Image: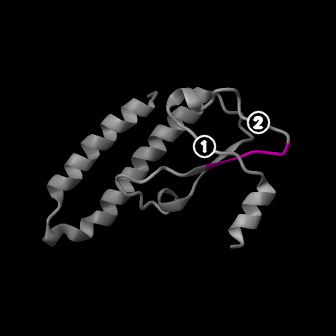
Amino acid sequence: MNHTASDFKQRKTALLSRCAAAQSLSNAAQIHQHLKWLSDLCDDTLKSLWQQAGIPPDFSLLAVGGYGRQALFPYSDVDVLVLLRAGLGLPEGSFGRRGMRGSRMSISRCLARSMH
């Protein structure tokens, strides 16, 4: 199935409604499962967007932050890292036309930031 950014928003709203309906003080332990479900929803959507964008197979998409820990909160950003070899670039408009935005960083800068 081909997912889009707007499709993600609709699916996220439906998931959050189901989670809210299931929440009560006695069911508070379910919150971890609900956070994982939201991360799983992002996985499905990003996999679809990645394929639709025609990203070359030697690129990697890594989940980071709360999303990477499968603890994505309802209104958090979905943080990902696109890892590619030096000298390569993403195809023009790969993500922008699909409702995604991001920044660029070299592998050496990623490694330097990971040390802090």
Q: Residue 102 carries which label?
A: 1
Query: 52 or 91, which is in the foreground?
Result: 91
Residue extending farthest right = 87
Q: In this view, does 28 lie to the left or right of 72?
A: left
Residue 17 image position (x, y, % from top left): 21, 47
User: On the image, numbered disc 2 is attached to which residue?
Assistant: 89
Q: Which picture quadrant has residue 73?
A: bottom left
Query: 31 or 115, which is in the foreground?
Result: 115
Q: Which residue is drawn at 25% across and 41% down?
A: 14
Residue 75 image position (x, y, % from top left): 36, 52
Residue 105 image position (x, y, % from top left): 73, 50
Q: Residue at x 68, y 73 (%)?
A: 116
C-alpha distance separating marks 1 and 2 = 13 Å
Query: 103 or 14, which is in the foreground?
Result: 103
Tell me which segment is drawn in magenta: 81-86
Q: Which picture quadrant has residue 19?
A: bottom left
